[in-house]
Image (cartoon, coloured by chain):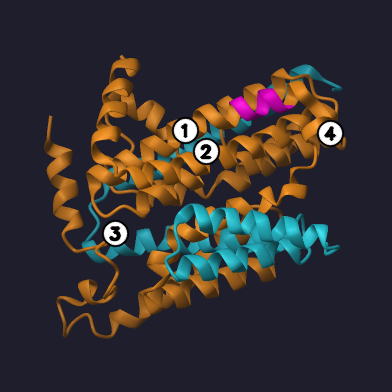
Chain colours: A orange, B cyan
Amino acid sequence: MIWVFRINYMRSIYRTLERSVLADVGLTCVAVFFIGLSYGAIAVASGFPLWVPAALSVLVLAGASEFLFVGIVATGGSPIAAALAGLLVNSRHLPYGLALPPGVTGRRWARLLGTHVMNDESVVFALAQPDLPRKRAAYWACGLGVLACWPGGAVLGGLIGSAVHDTNAFGLDAMFPAVILALIVKDLRDARTLRAALAGAAVALVATPFLPAGLPVLLALAALLLLVRAPATKASTSPGNEASTSPGNEGSTSPGQEPAATQVRTAP
Amino acid sequence: MKDSALVVAGMATLSAGTYAFRLSGQLMRARITFPPRAAKLLEAAAVIMLAALVATTALTEGHGFSGFARPAGVLVAGVLAWRKAPFIVVVLAAAVVTALLRILGGS
């Protein structure tokens, strides 16, 4: 069942996405693969049997939380405490689910898998696309790519071990923030979004030394207040003000997006 | 590994909880119809979190400073992205600048 849906999705991904987007997704997956290599190597080097990083990479499929889990348990922490710490890091997936327009993750059985492949990269690729069909295609292309490359990298890294221990030497650790930044820069051209994003980033940075991993990024959501307050004063006078919040945004968040979403939701 | 059963319990907790987070946001979104402005705010929320993720992964390691090489690489990537350089150039520039700075003896 899922397999049939998956093949259909694959086919429509090829039809829907521009080749440049697929190339970007491919590069992102290569980066994920290399980070997976170091993850698998580190996990095995810290004394875990290969099946631990392998199973985590498939079942959790969220890199930062897995690094944290492995790190805490390896240094003698309780696995349950490590799981809770990892869950804190992964709690941002709840607001991600809120942000994605309905239909992006698929319907019925496909959605079981579509939900699992939600991660920073697939969400940011989806948000960067202008309309629902392309959001969905980009989300699935990146999600399935990461589903193949992250576990693949982790297993291979665990097998070759310490040879790939230090991927930092190649600057690979800078690629993850660069990927995310490259994909949100379009939204940051809107001055109000930029201000809120900078404020949120500042909040997260200030909080990082004091709070457990994961909380600072959630705390950044306080910057949403900058976006809520400002237009509220004008809301009664200008009904079209939601369209005016992102002038020159290359249409990624155009007012026409919502009708498109509802259309697809009712389609068979 | 000390206690396999406990580690498996931890792994199961992390897997199931993460899936629950992934699912619950979508379910909330499907139950409630948001006005367009609220939907835009939700998308802005994702952008703000992603920006915070960029800042923290670029500048910090654990609870401390990551050293200069990585944020310098990400900064170069940001400038290139702002000037609409191709994605692959942006991402590879981050890695190359960071790696070069480390070779040159930065941290």
Q: Characterize the local packing of mark 2: few (<14), some (14-19) or many (20 or more) Cα atoms within 10 angstroms.
A: many
- The three-letter code of the residue at mark 3 reads Ala
Amino acid beneath label 2: Cys
Q: Quadrant of the C terminus of chain A?
A: top left
Whether labels 2 and 1 share one chain: yes
Residue shown at 82% from the left, 20% from the top: B3
Say what secondary structure mark 2 lies in: helix
From mark 1 to mark 4, how far is it between C-alphas? Answer: 29 Å
Side of B92 where A192 appears, left or right: left
Give me the residue at 63% from left, 22% from top: A55
Judging from the image, mark 3 belongs to the subunit labelled B
Earlier along the polypeptide chain: callout 2 or callout 1?
2
Tally the numbered discs.
4
Query: Residue A105: image x %, image y %?
Result: 34, 37
Q: Which mark is residue A74?
A: 4
Q: Which numbered disc, 1 or 4, marks the residue that appears first in the sequence?
A: 4
